[in-house]
Amino acid sequence: MSATTANPVLRVAPAPSAEAAAYFRASLAFHTDVSDVAAALAADGEPGFVLVDCRSTESWDQGHVPGAVHLPTALVPEQAPRLLDPAVPVVTYCWGPGCDGAKRAALALAELGYRVKEMLGGFEYWVREGFAHETWQGTGRRAVDPLTSPVDAADCGC
């Protein structure tokens, strides 16, 4: 067995750089992260997108991003035309990285003609990174989880 095949990382060789660049460029067209969404929402003026929480009402009540629109995935075909402007890009989120709900909502919206991205990390990482959230009881904010966000810096530098 060669050194390359014994190494689990290199068992499948990395893609050529041009293919890798195309893949990562495409990935960024479909995804954003909680830090970038938070920065856009905190900036002066309109963020240029609408943030959609695609979870159930019970989940929404448990906590959601301030300013998000509540549109459960199952209701997208029926309610999206009433709630969302097709000219404004949409960013979807669900519980967290272990949930495909935001992908399913993004797919449903894309099939209706909306331009859409998924917020990676979902509500879980929004809260873990210390951003404010709303519940049926009011607004809250948790301490930054040092495993997900720098505690003493404005951003991670990426």
Image (cartoon, helix red, strand yellow):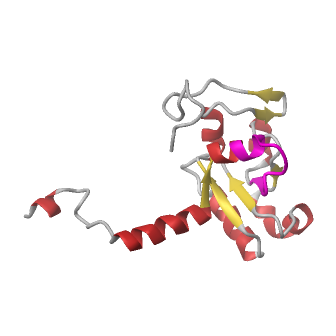
Percent of width and height locating residue 5: 16, 63
Q: Is residue 56 above or below residue 133?
A: below
Horizontal side of residue 42 vs 97, given as left or right: right
Q: Is residue 49 magenta?
A: yes
**Total count of labels:** 0
Query: Which corner quadrant holds the N terminus?
Result: bottom left
Horizontal side of residue 71 vs 145, given as left or right: right
Q: Is residue 13 above or below residue 148?
A: below
Say which of 148 and 135 sits in front: 148
Say which of 49 and 139 sits in front: 49
Q: Is residue 156 above or below residue 19?
A: above
Magenta segment boundaries in residue numbering: 39-53
Q: Quadrant of residue 106?
A: bottom right
Q: Is residue 138 above or below residue 156?
A: above
Residue at image point 74% right, 54% down: 54
Say which of 99 and 151 sits in front: 151
Percent of width and height locating residue 23: 47, 69
Horizontal side of residue 151 vs 84, given as left or right: left
Q: Residue furthest left?
A: 1
Residue at image point 76% right, 44% down: 41
Percent of width and height locating residue 8: 23, 56
Residue 65 visible from this viewpoint: no
Residue 52 visible from this viewpoint: yes
Percent of width and height locating residue 72: 77, 56
Q: Quadrant of residue 153?
A: top right
Q: Is residue 12 magenta?
A: no
Residue at image point 80% right, 33% down: 135
Horizontal side of residue 29 vs 134, given as left or right: left
Residue at image point 33% right, 72% down: 16
